[in-house]
Amino acid sequence: MKFIDKLKTLTPFSYMWFLKRNIGEAKTILDLGCEDGRLLELLSFGEKWQVTGVDIYKENVEKASRRNIFVKVIKGDVVEVSKKFVKLRKKFDVVFCSQVIEHIERKKGEQLFDLVDKLARKRIVIGTPKGFMNQPHVFLGNNPHMHHKSGWTIEDFKNHGYKVYGIGFWPIWKEEGLARIDNKLLFLTMTILGYIFSPIVYYFPTLGAGILGIKQKV
Protein backbone atom coordinates (compact mmCIF):
# COMPACT_ATOMS: atom_id res chain seq x y z
CA MET A 1 0.00 0.00 0.00
CA LYS A 2 1.40 3.37 -0.99
CA PHE A 3 2.07 6.04 1.64
CA ILE A 4 -0.45 8.40 0.04
CA ASP A 5 -3.12 5.69 0.35
CA LYS A 6 -2.37 5.22 4.05
CA LEU A 7 -2.54 8.97 4.51
CA LYS A 8 -6.12 9.02 3.21
CA THR A 9 -7.32 7.00 6.19
CA LEU A 10 -5.34 9.06 8.69
CA THR A 11 -6.22 12.59 7.53
CA PRO A 12 -8.83 14.01 9.94
CA PHE A 13 -12.21 14.89 8.38
CA SER A 14 -11.40 13.21 5.05
CA TYR A 15 -14.04 10.85 3.65
CA MET A 16 -11.82 7.82 4.33
CA TRP A 17 -11.22 9.00 7.89
CA PHE A 18 -14.96 9.31 8.49
CA LEU A 19 -15.56 5.80 7.16
CA LYS A 20 -12.88 4.17 9.29
CA ARG A 21 -13.93 6.13 12.36
CA ASN A 22 -17.50 4.90 12.03
CA ILE A 23 -16.57 1.28 11.36
CA GLY A 24 -14.93 1.40 14.77
CA GLU A 25 -13.92 -1.73 16.65
CA ALA A 26 -14.70 -4.85 14.69
CA LYS A 27 -13.43 -8.31 13.97
CA THR A 28 -15.83 -9.45 11.25
CA ILE A 29 -17.15 -7.19 8.49
CA LEU A 30 -19.62 -7.86 5.70
CA ASP A 31 -18.78 -5.60 2.74
CA LEU A 32 -21.87 -5.46 0.52
CA GLY A 33 -20.97 -4.24 -2.95
CA CYS A 34 -17.25 -4.55 -2.30
CA GLU A 35 -16.27 -3.71 -5.91
CA ASP A 36 -12.61 -4.65 -6.42
CA GLY A 37 -11.89 -4.58 -2.67
CA ARG A 38 -9.65 -1.54 -2.78
CA LEU A 39 -11.74 0.57 -0.39
CA LEU A 40 -11.76 -1.96 2.46
CA GLU A 41 -8.10 -2.70 1.82
CA LEU A 42 -7.29 0.97 2.37
CA LEU A 43 -9.51 1.23 5.42
CA SER A 44 -8.02 -1.95 6.92
CA PHE A 45 -4.61 -0.33 7.40
CA GLY A 46 -3.50 -1.18 10.94
CA GLU A 47 -6.49 -3.48 11.55
CA LYS A 48 -7.01 -7.25 11.73
CA TRP A 49 -10.43 -7.40 10.14
CA GLN A 50 -11.94 -10.56 8.69
CA VAL A 51 -13.92 -9.30 5.72
CA THR A 52 -16.53 -11.13 3.66
CA GLY A 53 -17.16 -9.36 0.37
CA VAL A 54 -20.16 -9.51 -1.95
CA ASP A 55 -20.33 -8.10 -5.47
CA ILE A 56 -22.42 -8.88 -8.53
CA TYR A 57 -19.73 -8.09 -11.12
CA LYS A 58 -17.42 -11.01 -11.92
CA GLU A 59 -14.34 -8.88 -12.61
CA ASN A 60 -14.70 -7.14 -9.23
CA VAL A 61 -15.03 -10.47 -7.45
CA GLU A 62 -11.86 -11.78 -9.09
CA LYS A 63 -9.86 -8.68 -8.16
CA ALA A 64 -11.17 -8.54 -4.59
CA SER A 65 -10.40 -12.23 -4.09
CA ARG A 66 -6.72 -11.47 -4.65
CA ARG A 67 -6.63 -9.02 -1.74
CA ASN A 68 -5.49 -10.49 1.56
CA ILE A 69 -8.12 -8.82 3.73
CA PHE A 70 -11.01 -10.92 2.39
CA VAL A 71 -11.71 -14.32 3.92
CA LYS A 72 -14.29 -14.87 1.16
CA VAL A 73 -15.68 -12.93 -1.80
CA ILE A 74 -19.09 -14.00 -3.07
CA LYS A 75 -20.44 -13.24 -6.53
CA GLY A 76 -24.10 -12.34 -6.29
CA ASP A 77 -26.81 -9.77 -5.77
CA VAL A 78 -26.37 -8.04 -2.39
CA VAL A 79 -30.04 -8.50 -1.45
CA GLU A 80 -30.20 -12.17 -2.40
CA VAL A 81 -26.92 -13.01 -0.67
CA SER A 82 -28.06 -11.10 2.44
CA LYS A 83 -31.27 -13.15 2.47
CA LYS A 84 -29.22 -16.36 2.45
CA PHE A 85 -27.06 -15.10 5.32
CA VAL A 86 -30.17 -14.25 7.34
CA LYS A 87 -31.56 -17.76 6.78
CA LEU A 88 -28.24 -19.18 7.95
CA ARG A 89 -28.37 -16.86 10.98
CA LYS A 90 -25.03 -15.35 10.09
CA LYS A 91 -23.86 -12.31 12.05
CA PHE A 92 -21.09 -9.79 11.41
CA ASP A 93 -19.79 -7.13 13.77
CA VAL A 94 -20.22 -4.50 11.07
CA VAL A 95 -22.19 -4.44 7.85
CA PHE A 96 -20.55 -1.97 5.47
CA CYS A 97 -22.30 -0.77 2.32
CA SER A 98 -20.63 2.17 0.60
CA GLN A 99 -22.13 3.72 -2.55
CA VAL A 100 -24.24 0.65 -3.33
CA ILE A 101 -27.88 1.13 -2.34
CA GLU A 102 -28.38 3.75 -5.07
CA HIS A 103 -27.51 1.09 -7.66
CA ILE A 104 -30.59 -1.02 -6.85
CA GLU A 105 -34.30 -0.33 -7.21
CA ARG A 106 -36.18 1.36 -4.39
CA LYS A 107 -38.10 -1.78 -3.37
CA LYS A 108 -34.90 -3.82 -3.11
CA GLY A 109 -33.24 -1.01 -1.20
CA GLU A 110 -35.97 -1.13 1.43
CA GLN A 111 -35.41 -4.88 1.66
CA LEU A 112 -31.70 -4.29 2.13
CA PHE A 113 -32.34 -1.96 5.08
CA ASP A 114 -34.31 -4.74 6.80
CA LEU A 115 -31.77 -7.44 5.99
CA VAL A 116 -28.64 -5.62 7.19
CA ASP A 117 -30.45 -4.88 10.45
CA LYS A 118 -30.61 -8.64 11.04
CA LEU A 119 -27.02 -9.29 10.00
CA ALA A 120 -25.18 -6.63 12.01
CA ARG A 121 -24.04 -7.39 15.53
CA LYS A 122 -22.54 -3.97 16.42
CA ARG A 123 -23.26 -1.40 13.73
CA ILE A 124 -24.24 -0.66 10.14
CA VAL A 125 -22.44 1.84 7.90
CA ILE A 126 -24.17 2.93 4.68
CA GLY A 127 -22.97 5.67 2.33
CA THR A 128 -24.93 7.02 -0.65
CA PRO A 129 -25.56 10.27 -2.56
CA LYS A 130 -28.24 12.51 -1.04
CA GLY A 131 -31.26 12.19 -3.28
CA PHE A 132 -31.08 10.82 -6.80
CA MET A 133 -27.86 11.58 -8.67
CA ASN A 134 -27.03 10.45 -12.18
CA GLN A 135 -23.85 8.41 -12.20
CA PRO A 136 -21.06 10.43 -13.88
CA HIS A 137 -20.11 8.80 -17.17
CA VAL A 138 -16.47 8.51 -16.09
CA PHE A 139 -17.48 5.97 -13.41
CA LEU A 140 -19.56 3.70 -15.63
CA GLY A 141 -16.73 1.77 -17.30
CA ASN A 142 -17.62 -1.72 -18.53
CA ASN A 143 -19.65 -2.64 -15.46
CA PRO A 144 -23.35 -2.81 -16.47
CA HIS A 145 -24.41 -2.47 -12.83
CA MET A 146 -22.95 1.00 -12.27
CA HIS A 147 -26.03 3.05 -13.23
CA HIS A 148 -28.00 4.61 -10.39
CA LYS A 149 -31.55 3.33 -9.96
CA SER A 150 -32.76 5.03 -6.78
CA GLY A 151 -32.20 8.04 -4.55
CA TRP A 152 -32.26 8.22 -0.75
CA THR A 153 -32.90 11.09 1.64
CA ILE A 154 -31.91 11.98 5.17
CA GLU A 155 -35.49 11.22 6.22
CA ASP A 156 -35.29 7.73 4.67
CA PHE A 157 -32.33 6.89 6.87
CA LYS A 158 -33.82 8.42 10.01
CA ASN A 159 -37.02 6.45 9.45
CA HIS A 160 -34.90 3.28 9.58
CA GLY A 161 -33.24 4.31 12.84
CA TYR A 162 -29.98 5.70 11.47
CA LYS A 163 -28.01 8.66 12.69
CA VAL A 164 -27.15 10.70 9.61
CA TYR A 165 -23.99 12.61 8.76
CA GLY A 166 -23.14 14.66 5.70
CA ILE A 167 -20.36 13.96 3.21
CA GLY A 168 -19.07 16.30 0.49
CA PHE A 169 -20.08 20.00 0.45
CA TRP A 170 -23.16 20.13 -1.79
CA PRO A 171 -22.21 23.12 -4.04
CA ILE A 172 -18.92 21.39 -4.86
CA TRP A 173 -19.85 17.70 -5.10
CA LYS A 174 -23.47 17.69 -6.26
CA GLU A 175 -24.27 16.27 -9.71
CA GLU A 176 -23.32 19.52 -11.46
CA GLY A 177 -21.09 20.83 -8.68
CA LEU A 178 -18.08 23.11 -8.96
CA ALA A 179 -15.67 20.15 -8.88
CA ARG A 180 -17.42 18.27 -11.70
CA ILE A 181 -15.26 19.85 -14.38
CA ASP A 182 -12.37 18.88 -16.60
CA ASN A 183 -9.91 21.42 -15.23
CA LYS A 184 -7.21 19.99 -12.97
CA LEU A 185 -6.31 23.25 -11.24
CA LEU A 186 -9.90 24.20 -10.50
CA PHE A 187 -10.67 20.63 -9.45
CA LEU A 188 -7.78 20.72 -6.97
CA THR A 189 -8.92 24.09 -5.64
CA MET A 190 -12.49 22.86 -5.16
CA THR A 191 -11.26 19.65 -3.52
CA ILE A 192 -9.27 21.64 -0.97
CA LEU A 193 -12.23 23.94 -0.36
CA GLY A 194 -14.51 20.94 0.06
CA TYR A 195 -12.11 19.46 2.61
CA ILE A 196 -12.16 22.71 4.62
CA PHE A 197 -15.95 22.53 4.80
CA SER A 198 -16.06 18.79 5.58
CA PRO A 199 -16.27 19.04 9.42
CA ILE A 200 -19.25 21.39 9.14
CA VAL A 201 -20.95 19.27 6.48
CA TYR A 202 -20.46 16.14 8.56
CA TYR A 203 -22.54 17.49 11.44
CA PHE A 204 -25.02 19.37 9.24
CA PRO A 205 -25.98 16.73 6.65
CA THR A 206 -28.39 19.01 4.78
CA LEU A 207 -25.23 20.74 3.45
CA GLY A 208 -23.86 17.49 2.04
CA ALA A 209 -23.99 15.97 -1.41
CA GLY A 210 -23.80 12.56 0.24
CA ILE A 211 -25.22 10.74 3.24
CA LEU A 212 -23.36 8.60 5.74
CA GLY A 213 -25.88 6.63 7.76
CA ILE A 214 -24.77 4.91 10.97
CA LYS A 215 -26.90 2.56 13.02
CA GLN A 216 -25.58 1.33 16.33
CA LYS A 217 -26.82 -2.10 17.40
CA VAL A 218 -25.18 -2.23 20.85
Image: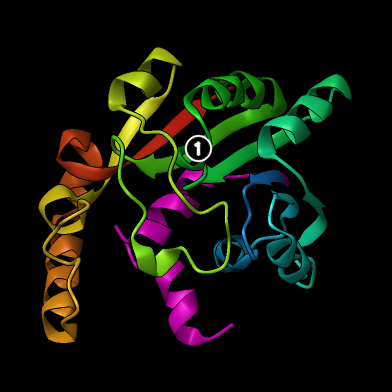
Residue at (29, 38) in percent of width and height: 130
Asked if 139 appears above or below 31 in the picture, the reply is: below
Residue nearer the viewer, 133 or 164: 133
Residue at (41, 71) in percent of width and height: 8
The image quadrant where one finds the N terminus is bottom right
- Observer able to see residue 90: no
Element at badge 1? helix
What range is drawn magenta here? Answer: 1-28
Tell me residue 205's x, y (percent): 22, 36
Q: Is residue 214 left or right of residue 34?
A: left
Does residue 3 show up magenta in the picture? yes
Tell me residue 32's x, y (percent): 64, 44
Q: Is residue 198 left or right of residue 178?
A: right
- Observer able to see residue 15: yes
Q: Quadrant of residue 38?
A: bottom right
Asked if 113 appears above or below 175 in the picture, the reply is: above
Q: Is residue 6 left or right of residue 123?
A: left
The residue beneath circle 1 is 101
Farthest right residue in view: 88
